[in-house]
Amino acid sequence: MYFLLRPLLFTLSPEKAHKVTLGLLSFALVIPGMKAIFKALYSVKHPSLEREVFGLKFPNPVGLAAGFDKDAKHYEHLACFGFGFFEIGTITPKPQDGNPQPRLFRLPQDQGLINRMGFNNGGLDEAVERLKHRNPNIIVGGNIGKNKVTPNDEAVNDYLICFEGLL
C-alpha cells in the first residue's frame, strides 16, 4: 500500500504528509473489521518476544518512539501494528506551537528525516485527559520537556510538573 501512497505523500510537506497519513489511518480503522485485518498482518505474538522490565510486562521489545504521536491522539490506532509500547510527546506543561515551519525535512537519499519541530504539543492537561480513557493493555510512556518560555534555570520545575502529571 505504501508504494502506492508514497508518490502522493511526497507531493506534500513532510509535516502535512504525517498528519494526512494519521488521518487516513484513523479513518480506515473505524471501518468494521479493519483493526482485525491490520492486527493479523502486522502483529506478531510469541512468548520469546515478551519482556518484563521494572514490573511491566511488554508483549515485545519494539516500541514507537516519541515524536510520532506527540499528543497521545493515535497510539490506540497504531497498536494495530504490533508495537510493544508507545512513547508520547514530547509533552510540555503548557501548550506550545514549536518552531516555525518548515521544521521537518526529508533526506530521500538517506531515507531519513531531520526533525526540528521544537516540542509542538497541546500541553500536559490535554494529553492527561486523553490518557485517562486509554486501554490499560497498551503500555504508554511519556517524553517530557520544558516549555520554550521557561528559563533554563527553572527547567526542573517543568520536568517535575510533567513527570507528576503523567504518573
Image (cartoon, rainbow, N blue to C red):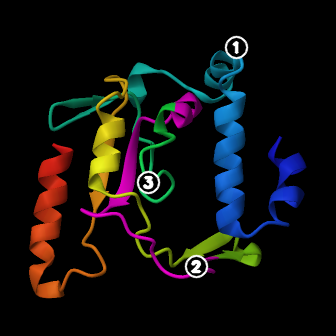
Q: Amino acid at mark 1?
A: Pro
Question: At which x and y percent is residue 40?
Answer: 65, 19
Horizontal side of 24 relative to 141 (left or right) equals right
Residue at mark 2: 103
- In depth, the one of 132 and 88 nearer the eye is 132
Q: Amino acid at mark 2?
A: Arg
Quadrant where the image shows the N terminus: top right
- In depth, the one of 156 and 1 nearer the eye is 156
In this rendering, is residue 83 above or below 118?
above
Residue at mark 3: 65
**Does the magenta-highlighted stretch encompass residue 144?**
no
Q: Amino acid at mark 3?
A: Ala
Question: At which x and y percent is residue 98?
Answer: 45, 74
Q: Nearer the viewer, mark 3 or mark 1?
A: 1
Horizontal side of 116 relative to 18 (left or right) equals left
Q: Residue at x 37, y 29 (%)?
A: 138
Name the disc covering residue 32, or none: 1
> Which one is earlier in the sequence, the residue at label 3 or at label 2?
3
Question: At which x and y percent is residue 9?
Answer: 80, 58
> Which one is earlier in the sequence, the residue at label 3 or at label 1?
1
Q: Secondary structure at mark 3?
A: loop
Horizontal side of 78 relative to 84 (left or right) equals right
Q: Residues within 10 Å of mark 1 (few under 14, many from 20)?
A: few
Q: Secondary structure at mark 2?
A: loop
> Which one is earlier in the sequence, the residue at label 2 or at label 1?
1
Q: Residue at x 24, y 62 (%)?
A: 93
Q: Residues within 10 Å of mark 3 (few under 14, many from 20)?
A: some
Q: Cα distance, mark 3 to mark 2? A: 18 Å
Instruction: Give the residues drawn in magenta, as a range.
Output: 77-104
Horizontal side of 54 relative to 17 (left or right) equals left
